[in-house]
């Protein structure tokens, strides 16, 4: 019979492999069907930031799957129900990834830049949230961090969130405004960045 740690390790592997498989499939299809924007066209800050955060984040998750004892130094004590919440987040990221990528289609990009044939997507999760792909990634890694009670993965997830909000989204949305103008400004008024907007009384959104 599996103990809790082994069960969470299996869930971690399932969530990670599932979301990565979906991402790889749709990204490869987008490259085959249309334009690919080289990462070198982005700013040095974004390129360096991705390397500094993404490499240890992905590397630590792979270690939790393949050799969890190597990451024992990053363990901290949390209740099992919190680890269960992490499992829910991780598992939810798999269908979420499919929903997001299938909605994006050939608009999937490796960068914050806008493709020449980019289409403004307003269906699927984009009806409520402008950047559900980032939300999906945060759900996955935060969930994995909680499942494995890893302050390292949870901490890197928080750093990623801050970077997305302060560096990535402003640059990406500047390109989208330049491309789509008032159509994108209207989308900004109606949707949230990572979570749906909540309407207050009087019709004001938060």
Image (cartoon, rainbow, N blue to C red):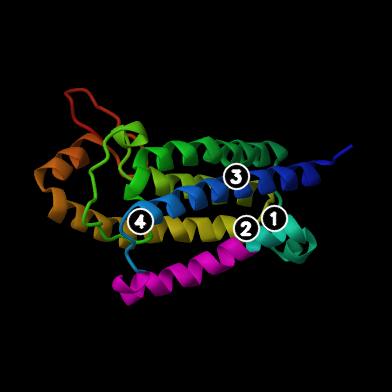
Q: Mark 1 points at which residue?
A: 76
Please give the range of residues in magenta. 39-59
Q: Mark 2 points at which residue?
A: 151
Residue 99's spot in the image, x, y percent?
A: 44, 36
| For marks 4 and 1 on the same chain, the one whose residue lies earlier in the sequence | 1
Q: Which of marks 4 and 1 is in front?
A: 4
Asked if the residue at tag 1 contacts the one at tag 4, i.e. Cβ–Cβ closer than 8 Å, the answer is no
- Residue 6 lies left or right of residue 157; in this view the side is right
* Neighbourhood count class around disc 1 (C-alpha, 10 Å): few under 14, some 14–19, many 20 upward: few
The residue at 45%/48% (across/down) is 26
| For marks 4 and 2 on the same chain, the one whose residue lies earlier in the sequence | 4
* Neighbourhood count class around disc 3 (C-alpha, 10 Å): few under 14, some 14–19, many 20 upward: some
Secondary structure, mark 3, is helix
Magenta stretch, main secondary structure, is: helix
Closer to us: 161 or 1: 1
* Residue farthest to the left, as pictured: 182
* Neighbourhood count class around disc 4 (C-alpha, 10 Å): few under 14, some 14–19, many 20 upward: many
Q: Name the residue under label 4.
A: 109
**Quadrant (top left/top right/bottom left/bottom right) for the C terminus:** top left
Between the residue at mark 2 and the residue at mark 1, the CA separation in whole angstroms equals 6 Å
Asked if the residue at tag 1 contacts the one at tag 2, i.e. Cβ–Cβ closer than 8 Å, the answer is yes
Residue 88's spot in the image, x, y percent?
A: 60, 35
Q: Name the residue under label 3.
A: 18
């Amino acid at each position: 019979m599996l103990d809790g740690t082994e069960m969470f390790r299996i869930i971690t592997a399932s969530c990670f492999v599932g979301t990565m498989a979906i991402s790889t499939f749709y990204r490869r299809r987008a490259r085959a069907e249309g334009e690919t924007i080289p990462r070198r066209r982005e700013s040095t800050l974004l390129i360096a930031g991705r390397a500094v955060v993404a490499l240890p984040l992905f590397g630590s998750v792979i270690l939790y799957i393949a050799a969890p004892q190597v990451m024992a130094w990053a363990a901290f004590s949390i209740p099992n129900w919190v680890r269960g919440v992490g499992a829910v987040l991780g598992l939810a990221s798999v269908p979420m990834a499919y929903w997001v990528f299938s909605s994006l289609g050939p608009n999937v990009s490796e960068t914050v830049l806008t493709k020449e044939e980019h289409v403004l997507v307003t269906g699927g999760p984009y009806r409520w949230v402008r950047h559900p792909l980032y939300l999906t990634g945060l759900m996955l890694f935060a969930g994995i961090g909680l499942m494995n009670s890893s302050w390292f993965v949870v901490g890197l997830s928080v750093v990623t969130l801050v970077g997305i909000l302060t560096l990535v989204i402003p640059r990406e949305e500047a390109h989208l405004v330049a491309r789509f103008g008032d159509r994108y400004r209207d989308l900004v008024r109606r949707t949230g960045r990572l979570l749906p907007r909540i309407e207050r009384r009087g019709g004001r959104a938060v």
